[in-house]
Amino acid sequence: MYLCLASFKVKIMETVVFSYDERNPIAQKTLDYLKSLGVFKTQKRKMTSIEEAMEDIEKGRVYRIINRTK
């Protein structure tokens, strides 16, 4: 989208977020088609620290060790 202000062109970037079920083949094919046009740039969302911790727990990367020395 371009906005003309007194003979100045200002480029405006918009962010669009799609929420869809990854198991839906129609939604997946639609997004693949949009990506194939080359008009859109995709970027992965960064995980928050809480999401990273939950993933570590789910994948078994967290171990509980009890120190019983006294």
Image (cartoon, rainbow, N blue to C red):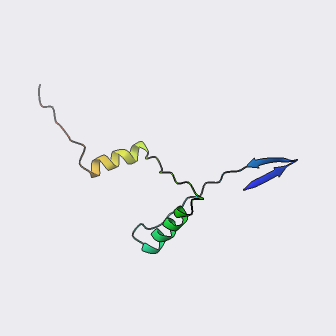
Q: Residue 65: percent from the left, percent from the top?
A: 17, 37
59 relative position to 17: left or right: left
18 relative position to 47: left or right: right
Q: Which residue is most to the bottom?
A: 26
> Taking 27 as reference, is 59 above or below it?
above
Q: Which residue is most to the right?
A: 6
Q: Residue 46: percent from the left, percent from the top?
A: 46, 46
Q: Residue at x 39, y 70 (%)?
A: 23
Q: Residue 51: percent from the left, percent from the top?
A: 39, 48
Say which of 59 and 24 sits in front.
24
Q: Residue at x 44, y 68 (%)?
A: 21
Q: Quadrant of the C terminus?
A: top left
Q: Residue at x 51, y 70 (%)?
A: 30
Q: Which residue is most to the top?
A: 70
Q: Residue 25: percent from the left, percent from the top?
A: 42, 73
Q: Quadrant of the N terminus?
A: bottom right
